[in-house]
Image (cartoon, rainbow, N blue to C red):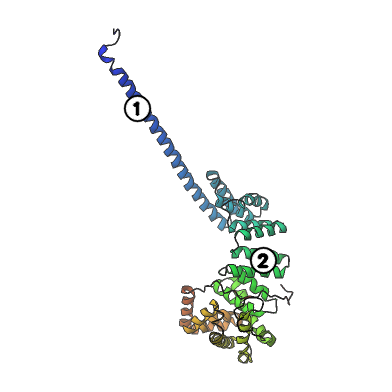
Amino acid sequence: MCRSLDCDTLPQFPYFYKKRRTGMHKRSSLLKTLFVAGVLFSQTVFGQDAAELYKTATGFQRTGDYSNAILVFNQALQLDPDNFETKKQLAYTYYLKGDMNKAKTIVDPLLSKKEVDVQAFQIAGNIYVSREEWKTAQKIYERALRKFPESGELYNDNGNLLMNFKMYDASLNSWLKGIEKDPAFPGNYYNATKTYYYSNNPLWCIIYGEIFMNMESFTTRTAEVRNILLESYKRLFNDPALLNSVMPEEGKKKSRSANSGFAQSYKQAMGKQLGVVTGGVDLDALIMVRTRFLLDWDNNYAADYPFSLFDFQRKLLRDGLFEAYNQWLFGPAINQARYKAWTSLHKQEYDAFNKFQRDTPFKTRPDEYYNDGKFSLVNTGY
């Protein structure tokens, strides 16, 4: 019997209650959806903010404002605390600022991360070198080269460390290994050229010096190597004994072991040009020597020892740009005033060479490593 409620309304109550509960569930689901979306949105915003902060910090780093760079890198890490790249750059900034203790604290854990890269090992090595912890630095480079055995940068840095110990053979071997494993990286050519300059083997100064100048064409290091290249040609022709060669037996021409057929072939081809430099090693003589050398190399040795540098020279010769190239290569070191006068008088030709240099950059090729690794220090000026 119905007392306080109309009986006709009773059947509607369970339905109304069920409908109300369903509405509550819908609102709850909607709130959950909005919450998840908000979290995802916040993460996206934070990610964008961290990326922008990273960009700002690297800008400060480039301009030498290391204090602001550190401040902003730390802000970025608050938003994205596990970002490997940000931590790496923060360590590098502390290194640039001279705070090696903080730099070390940040970089050490990075070396065990799965994201570790060549640059992280380089930064760590530089930090330990600055702290004069030589053995630890050496262990870092050894560890790095086991992980990245094709990295020219690491061989270069390792060679620099060994040179600090005056381990000339070991440092040169590291740079040569870098040339062999990563022939497109210029730093090893630069250091090998400088080291060979203090040896009795100007051949590799000439080869590596010219390769380096084509890779790094307009820096202070280019000017330094230009002078070494010129002096190496003079030394090569001033001592005829350096051009004495004994060709390897037939069938061993392609050997790249200690009896390098490439080096012997080079000496033999260059020795034929001695008569050209009887009046001294000037620019005209060098152009003639190098032109005749190329023609002889093509006829007698190129098939056995293909070499990208000689192919590059051959293309310049074929395109009528070889004189302009040699002016750029040697002119400023021989006589700066004459070099400027020549470029003014032959502007069209020199502009064509500059365009060629921009549009057809020199490129090395793999499997053209011919160095026998021999080194004998004869000048203690290093």
Going from the N terminus, do you reach mark 2 or mark 1 first? Answer: 1
* SS under mark 1: helix
**Is there any visible trace of residue 287 in the rendered image?**
no
Number of numbered discs present?
2
The amino acid type, in three-letter code, at marker 2 is Gly
Give the residue furthest to the left.
8
Taking the spot 47% from the left edge, 74% from the top edge, the residue there is 360
| Residue 114 sits above or below residue 317 on the image | above
- Work out whether residue 196 or residue 281 is closer to the camera in this orientation and state it: 196
User: Residue 10 at what x, y percent from top left?
Assistant: 29, 15
Taking the spot 58% from the left edge, 54% from the top edge, the residue there is 116
Taking the spot 49% from the left edge, 75% from the top edge, the residue there is 357
**Residue 215 located left or right of residue 130:** left
**Residue 192 located left or right of residue 2:** right
- Work out whether residue 13 or residue 285 is closer to the camera in this orientation and state it: 13
Label placed on residue 23: 1
Disc 2 target residue? 159
| Residue 165 sits above or below residue 201 on the image | above
Q: Quarter holding the N terminus?
A: top left
Report the Cα–Cα distance between label 2 and label 1: 73 Å
Disc 2 residue crowd, few under 14, some 14–19, many 20+, Cα 10 Å: many
The amino acid type, in three-letter code, at marker 1 is Gly
Give the residue furthest to the front.
251
